Amino acid sequence: MKKLINDPENYVDEMLDGMVAAHPDRLRRLDGTNVLVRADAPIDGKVGVVSGGGSGHEPTHAGYIGDGMLDGAAAGEVFTSPTADQLEEMVRACDAGEGVLCVVKNYEGDVMNFETAGEMAEIEDVEVAEVVVDDDVAVEDSLYTSGRRGVCGTIFVHKIAGAKAAEGADLEEVRTVAEKVVDNVGTMGMALTSCITPEKGEPTFDLGDDEIELGIGIHGEPGVKRTEVMSADEVADHLTEQVLDDLDLDDGDEVATIVNGMGGTPLSELYIVNRRVQKVLDDHGLDTWDAWVGDYMTSLDMMGCSVTVLRLDDELKELLGAPADTPALKQRD
Amino acid sequence: MADAEIQREAILAAVDNVAARIAEEKAYLTELDSAIGDADHGANMDRGFRAVVEAVEDDDTDGMEADELVKLVGKTIISNVGGAAGPLYGGSTMLASKELEGGITAETSVAFAEAYLQKVQDRGKAEIGAKTMVDALVPVVHTYKKSIEQDDLPPLTALSKAVDACERGVRYTVPLRARKGRASYLDWRSVGHQDPGATSTLYILEELLETAEEYLDGEVVRDARSPDVPDEPPEEVADEPLGEGDE
């Protein structure tokens, strides 16, 4: 399999160096770690908001470091949680004395390492809070999780918690609004092809030319159903209906959506999916306040997409619309 | 064993013994894990304990108190193991280490064991019967505490009873259907496999006992390596190993 890599061993290290080289004015790498933080971290008077997890989901996580979003992001090896000591260093580097919110996706390794890091940081008198994102409506328990997996809805948590922190809210307020997002967001994904990890160099799972998999996870872990190839509209209908079923929205509710690419799908196809997703929402009497389309949380080079829907209220709308300036997401007033 | 220097020596010896044992059992632990997990438990633990040996060989440990040294052990495991095992083994060791403040005594070792188990359960959210290391640790801590606090046995005897209890716990995991961790995805196909985490916990305890025998007065109460622990992995009942991505 052809890949633009050198040694798989150096995959994460070289990627992080490349990110810093692209944004030297805004990103800084903590010495001896795979942690990137804002060049100006910690920000005086502001609660820190940090995230992290396995690599291979770019631009998640470090792509969202910047004004109005994250203060730091820790990169584990590909599809592997960062270790707790690196997470602790990140937390300490992003604490300006106001405390730090860790945004964690619900995967066992991530949850345990973040919890351990939080306890380690608390020993050093850093106040730490945590929010665990479990937005994937496809599976109840999975290969890597007890409970639902945390996937693309995490980006809305980064955005909204980051905006709340930027407003000067305290740690409890930032945590509360992050929880509100988690309670109101759902996602479901699908794959046309498997991802290929740099270590393995070949597809993680076999999917026939005439097959797709619904409900897939962001590490190529099993979904809920394999079916024959469907049209973009059929995929969009299926994913959106599953998410809406789970969220139990009311006629007239306002929502924000993400049609997310898994890394190997052209933007044109994502727009085709989005066109149908918006029609389904409209048919349900829902009002889309904001629709994001693009590669937000990828699975290396997997072809496929996920659909995320977030129910909004006035507070969430304001925070979602607040300015952000990060390598992967820019938003103006 | 009040002398801090002797305690330091004992901890260093225990680290060496555990690291050597894990290295010896590395392939077997990975084999157990490949049946019901992601096939890295032996390699992970070996990497962790090799790092611990390196960390404590550092001159900086001179004059360290028992609790500080054990904390360093935990922290090193956290940094080098990762996954779920890093926080479970390393995080629990690190956080329980503060119970050893003032040195290792019968009382502080009970407190350490209880705190360790509590941390593992808080972190892993596993109860008895979920086919995890908790199935081995619960009987260990119960037996050790009871032997010391109720039966008034010497610590060495208490530890040896705890190792026996651990071994029974490990065997208890074999017929269980996994409900936590990656093994839970296999559901009934996990039945018949011994839990790797429970198994490595037993190896660690056996080496702690062996070390304690060297450092505590009193006769050797039992052979640390019980002949009852099978050398071969239990017979497989699953038909085919699951490939990643298989339904």
Image (spheres, grey):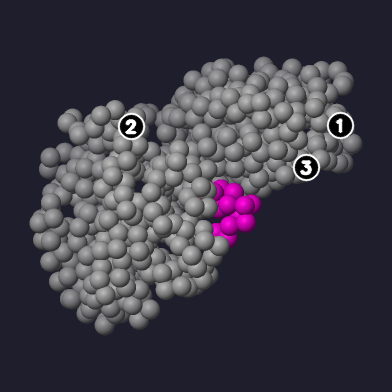
Residue shown at 76% from the left, 40% from the top:
B100
* Circle 2 residues within 10 Å: few <14, some 14–19, many ≥20: few
- Label placed on residue A10: 2
Judge if badges 1 and 2 mark residues of a common chain.
no
Distance, label 1 to label 2, CA atoms, is 48 Å
For the record, the magenta segment spans A112-130
Q: Where does label 1 land, which residue?
A: B2
Q: In which quarter of the image is the C terminus of chain B?
A: top left
Q: Which of B140 and A257 is in front in this view?
A: A257
The furthest residue to the right: B152
**For the residue carrying disc 3, how many other residues have a C-alpha within 10 Å: few (<14), some (14-19), or many (20+)?**
some
Q: In the image, what residue type sits under mark 1?
A: Ala
Q: What secondary structure is found at the residue carrying circle 3?
A: loop
The residue shown at (60%, 19%) is: B20
Residue A127 is a magenta residue: yes
Name the subunit of mark 2: A
- Say which residue label 3 marks: B101
Q: How far apart are marks 3 and 2 (CA)?
A: 41 Å
* Residue B1 visible somewhere in the drawing: yes
